[in-house]
Image (cartoon, rainbow, N blue to C red):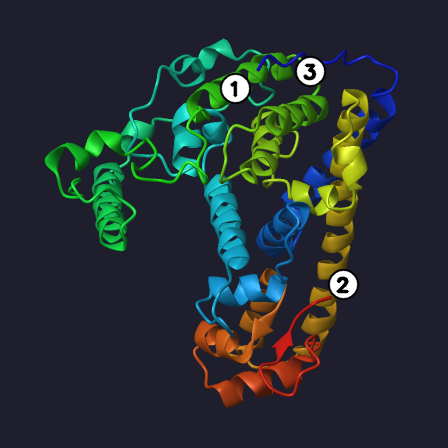
Amino acid sequence: MRYETPDPLHPALLPGLIAAEDGLARLDERAARHVVAEGFRERGQFFDAAAALWVAGELVHVEDIVLHDSHMDARAPSHELTIAHAVLRARRRLELAEPGWALNLPGLNALRGEQGAIPAKDDRSEAPDAQPNREEGGGAADDGDDNPLANEFAELDAAMARSQRLLDFHAGSLAETESPLSPERMTPERTGAEPTGQLGLLFDEDWDEGARLDAWRGVLAAADQLPACLGAAVLFDAWERIEPLRRQHWLGSLLVGAYLRSRGKVASHVLAFNTGLKTIRHERRRSKDRSARLNAFLEAMAVTADLGLKELDRLSLARTQMEMRIKDRRSNSNLPGLIDLVLSRPIVSTAMIARHLGVTPRGALNLVRELGVREITGRGRYRGWGVI
């Protein structure tokens, strides 16, 4: 699983590296001080979650993610929608955490749902001062052991595992002579391992996630010696080659944004890397030539920066137009709150507006009509409004 790092001065990488570095620097500068920065960050969470599933070959509509996140699903959520919402939650967790948290072993364990597992020895978390190449002073070390809910989550995981074994037992997937409630199968120490009784057709017994994660984290030291964008591209390429996780492969693109944030390249938010990656053809992303792949990832960062700048301009113009409509309104009007809601979501529904502003559904429709927000579904019922 050894991964060789490329030469940062390779002529084939320099044009893409310069474009990505310049674009991300401009995006970070504007996003850090823009008047609609908060709405830009929140909308980016939804767009990146939908793009992550698009890159994986699945189609999930952004409006479905918004409604599912608000517990207002128009239909039963699909498996793909559930994964997209998991991406959304992981992005929000990265946004609230310290810049270097996701790159430490406790952070990785938390993101992949292994808080109850006993962490192995981790050089990055135990010796944060040994990172001289961090541009922001080396990302604060994360202490994953002081989580007050870690034990409760571990107990819940153990209870769910016991329930699943009981269901499997009654379904006949386990041997008749093997009791699912035997004490040796109920030990909480098995929380970090795969549940017993799984079919070999679904889970590869030789797949060692811990060793693969260690191999990927071994590339971090080499990536720190490279420019921030090239280091992030190398980390993502290593993630694609090593494939540390079986069920959460989408986590690699989120770690690109976390790494750029820890390096101080995009410190204002977690970069929505998937929105630019989806514009790159599959043949380039999966090329056998490593230089071609790295150039594709660098181009994806440049495209992400360009899309982010356009989104900021679009939101700024929409805010100006809506504020002109509410000029000379009374001080306790709900229209300013509706503007903030519209700018923070790709789409809003009547129920979302009513619950957020504390008005009736009829009042929400009246506010939308007064504000002049565009209806983007084209339906007569279950309509939605937003900034395009």
**Mark nearer the N terminus (1 vs 2):** 1
| In this view, the mark in front (3 or 1) | 1
**Residue at the disc numbered 3:** 226
Query: From the viewer's perspective, is 88 left or right of 318?
Result: left
Q: Which mark is residue 276?
A: none
State the residue at coordinates (74%, 43%): 276
Task: Work out whether 10 lies above or below 258.
Answer: above
State the residue at coordinates (67%, 40%): 273
Q: Quadrant of residue 350?
A: bottom right
Q: Secondary structure at mark 2?
A: helix
User: Could you tell me the amino acid type at mark 2?
Assistant: Leu
| In this view, the mark in front (2 or 3) | 3
Q: Quadrant of residue 113?
A: top left
The quadrant in which the C terminus is found is bottom right
Task: Work out whether 198 lies above or below 125.
Answer: below
Q: Secondary structure at mark 3?
A: loop
The percent position of residue 69, horizontal first and vertical second, equals 48, 62
> Can I make out residue 4 in this image?
yes
